[in-house]
Image (cartoon, grey):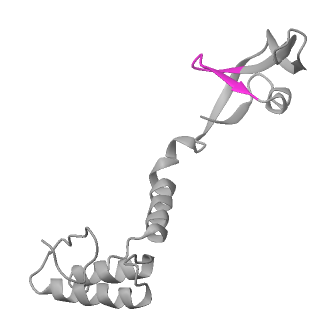
C-alpha cells in the first residue's frame, strides 16, 4: 500500500475508517519541519494519536514507573518486612565457627589472587519454649536472660 506523503517504507496501520487522512496530515505537518522524512518523538506521538482516532495513551514511561513502584510497595516487599514475635528464652548459646575471610590481594603468581585468612566468627542463638532456635544480635544476646521475653523479627 503506497501512499503519497507518508514516507519511505512506512505502512500505517489503520484502526478506524477515516483516520488515515488525519494520519497523512499529521505526517505532512512533520515533514514541513524536517524535509528528510524522519520525525522526532513528539511528532511520532502526534501521528500515532491521529492514527488511533485522536485518543492518546497516557501510559508512558513516567506513569509505568509509578505503577511499578506502587505494585512493589503493596505486594513485592511483604516478604522483606519484619514480623515481630515475642518468645520466652529457654536457652542461650554462643556458637563459634572458623571461616576464611578476604583481607587483600596479591600478584605473586602473576595473576591477581585474593588473600584469605582464617577467622573465628561468632553467632548468637536463643531457643524458645517450643524448641526453635533463633539467631540474634550480640546486643540482644547480652541483654536477655533465660526465662525473659524477647521480641524478635521473623
Question: In the image, is 41 to the left or to the right of 87?
Answer: left
Foreground residue among 146 and 29: 29
x, y percent for residue 96: 81, 11
**Based on the displayed image, in which of its 4 quarters is residue 128 positioned?**
top right
Name the residue: 49% across, 54% down: 72
Q: Is residue 48 above or below residue 85?
A: below
Q: Where is the N terminus found, in terms of image quarters? A: bottom left
Please state, as top left, top right, bottom left or bottom right, where the C terminus lies in the image. top right
Q: Which residues are magenta?
A: 126-136
Q: Is residue 55 visible?
A: no
Depth order, front residue of 58/31: 31
Q: Indicate the position of residue 9 as horizontal and vertical percent values.
A: 25, 67
Say which quarter of the image contains residue 110.
top right
User: In this rendering, does residue 5 appear at all?
Assistant: yes
Magenta stretch: includes residue 73: no
Q: Please tell me whether residue 86 is drawn above or below residue 43 in the rendered image.
A: above
Position in image of residue 109 (x %, y %): 86, 8
| Mark count | 0
Residue 134: within the magenta?
yes
Q: Is residue 123 left or right of residue 67?
A: right
Q: Please give the name of the residue rendered at 16% of the width and 83% of the height, measured from the top-left corner.
A: 20
The picture quadrant where one finds residue 141 is top right
Say if 142 sits above or below 91 in the image. below
Residue at point 91%, 11% (across, down): 108
Amino acid at each position: 500500500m503506497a501512499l503519497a506523503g507518508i514516507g519511505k517504507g512506512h505502512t500505517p496501520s489503520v484502526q478506524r475508517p477515516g483516520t488515515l487522512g488525519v494520519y497523512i496530515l499529521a505526517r505532512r505537518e512533520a515533514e514541513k519541519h524536517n524535509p528528510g522524512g524522519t520525525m522526532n518523538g513528539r511528532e511520532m506521538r502526534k501521528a500515532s494519536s491521529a492514527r488511533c482516532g485522536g485518543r492518546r495513551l497516557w501510559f508512558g514511561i513516567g506513569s509505568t514507573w509509578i505503577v511499578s513502584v506502587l505494585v512493589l510497595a503493596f505486594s513485592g516487599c511483604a516478604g522483606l518486612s519484619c514480623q515481630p514475635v515475642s518468645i520466652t528464652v529457654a536457652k542461650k548459646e554462643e556458637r563459634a565457627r572458623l571461616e576464611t575471610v578476604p583481607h587483600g590481594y596479591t600478584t605473586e603468581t602473576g595473576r591477581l589472587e585474593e588473600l584469605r585468612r582464617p577467622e573465628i566468627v561468632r553467632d548468637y542463638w536463643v531457643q524458645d519454649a517450643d524448641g526453635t532456635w533463633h539467631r540474634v544480635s550480640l546486643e540482644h544476646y547480652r541483654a536477655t536472660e533465660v526465662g525473659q521475653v524477647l521480641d524478635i523479627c521473623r
